[in-house]
Image (cartoon, rainbow, N blue to C red):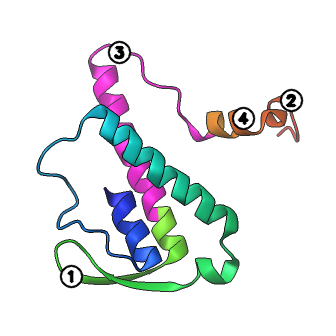
Amino acid sequence: MVDRIFIGHVTGEPHGFAADNTVETPSIAALRMAMAQADGWLVRYVECATPTELTRNVGFRFTDGDRGSMRVEEILLHLLTHGSNHRGMAARVLAVNGLDRPRDTFTRFLHQSDPVRRHGGAQS
């Protein structure tokens, strides 16, 4: 939801949420679809964003009614760290319960999306 809220702030379109959590928990299928849509939008946006766009200031209202403003690049960083925080909490719950944690680190993403990186480069 936070991704969708801040995407609304960046686009200037109403996000339609009165809070940063739902009253009812959506199904896994609904969550997966919403996450894929938000992720897709963010990837397409970042691929095309200019330096001027990234430094654009966005004024908005938080779901609690307070006013705020952030540059687009700050919003993107917020979404990245917010999502990482949740993934970390989920990984901790899995570990505490003796379950394997997903291998979803940033380094894994880089090497899967650009396999040439697996073959070396500068050594330190």
Q: Quadrant of residue 38?
A: bottom left
Q: Residue at x 41, y 46 (%)?
A: 35
Q: Residue at x 33, y 34 (%)?
A: 29
Q: Residue 66, which numbered label?
A: 1
Q: Amino acid at mark 1?
A: Asp
Q: Residue 48, which numbered label?
A: none
* Residue 64 drawn at (x, y percent): 16, 73
State the CA–CA distance, disc 1 to disc 4: 40 Å
Element at label 4: helix
Q: Amino acid at mark 3?
A: Leu
Crowding at mark 1 (Cα within 10 Å: few <14, some 14-19, many 20+): few
Depth check: 45 or 119 in front? 45
Q: Residue 111, which numbered label?
A: 4
Q: Residue at x 88, y 41 (%)?
A: 122
Element at label 1: loop
Residue identifier under label 3? 99
Give the magenta part as a residue range.
78-106
Query: Looking at the image, do the residues carrying marks 2 and 3 touch, with CB atoms under 8 Å apart?
Result: no
- 4 or 2: tag closer to the N-terminus: 4
* Residue 97 drawn at (x, y percent): 26, 17
